[in-house]
Amino acid sequence: SKLPPYILPLVPALAVLGGAFLSEKPRRRLLFAQGLFAAGVAVAIGGVAWYVGTLPDDAYYGLGSGYSPWLAAAAAIALAGAAAGAVLAWRARVRAAVASLAIGAAAAVMIGTAGHVVLAPAYSSAPLIASLPRPPSAQAAVFTVDAYDHSIPWSLGRTVTMVRYKDELERPVAWEPEKFIPDLTAFAQAWSSQREAYAFRSEEHTSELQSLAYL
């Protein structure tokens, strides 16, 4: 669940350790084994592509079937690179084996990552905001109720007022508590005082919000 910048600093150290290990071992056998392992991973990705394609319509908002072809393509590219790398390693063509494994793995990751855009509506509010007839004006109040999607302020290009939900932002909220609404009653009052207001809310709290007289 970590963001890429948290992981990338590990890569140089792992590269040094991996390079030292490879320099002391028979490269042909290691590359052949790596080719077989990568082929197994590619087959597993193909299995995931099939599984995602069979998910019911309510899973990932029905977007899984759109991502399945991307995964299948990534699996095919990875399998081709892995198989070619294993064959080339067995024939002692070390540099060609390394190139084949690297190109196949990199291409598979890029395809799988690029295809993830079809799942964006399940994880981001950007498509929802883009579908609005007109964006909120500069004077409009914008609330996020019992949830906080980091893509909302990014897509709107402005800050929002959080309601009842703190999560990892609990400490920053404590710095400026006047900019946070602690309960739904206070939110209803703030909502009714605005001429123009938008609220992004969690579906699980719909009935609770509808029970408020102000809304």
Image (cartoon, grey):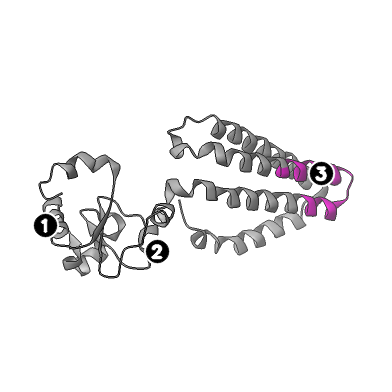
Judged from the image, the secondary structure of the residue bearing numbered disc 2 is helix
Residue 40 is situated, as x and y percent measured from the top left of the image, at: 68, 36
Using the rendered view, name the quadrant where residue 17 is placed: bottom right
Residue lying furthest front: 133
Q: Is residue 96 above or below residue 135?
A: above
Q: According to the image, label 3 marks what residue?
A: 84
The residue lying toward the viewer, choosing from 169 and 88, is 169
Disc 3 versus disc 2: distance between alpha carbons? 43 Å
Disc 2 versus disc 1: distance between alpha carbons? 26 Å
Identify the residue shown where x is 17% and y is 59%: 181
Q: What residue type is labelled 3?
A: Ala
The residue lying toward the viewer, choosing from 33 and 209, is 209
Identify the residue shown where x is 54% and y is 29%: 54
Q: How crowded is mark 1: few (under 14 residues within 10 Å), some or many (20 or more)?
A: few
- Is residue 39 toward the left or the right of residue 136 in the image? right
Q: According to the image, label 1 marks what residue?
A: 189
Q: Can residue 26 be seen in this view?
A: no
Q: What residue type is labelled 1?
A: Gln
Q: According to the image, label 2 marks what residue?
A: 154
The prevailing secondary structure element of the residues shown in magenta is helix
Q: Give the range drawn in magenta.
A: 77-100
Q: In this view, does 77 lie above or below 141?
A: above
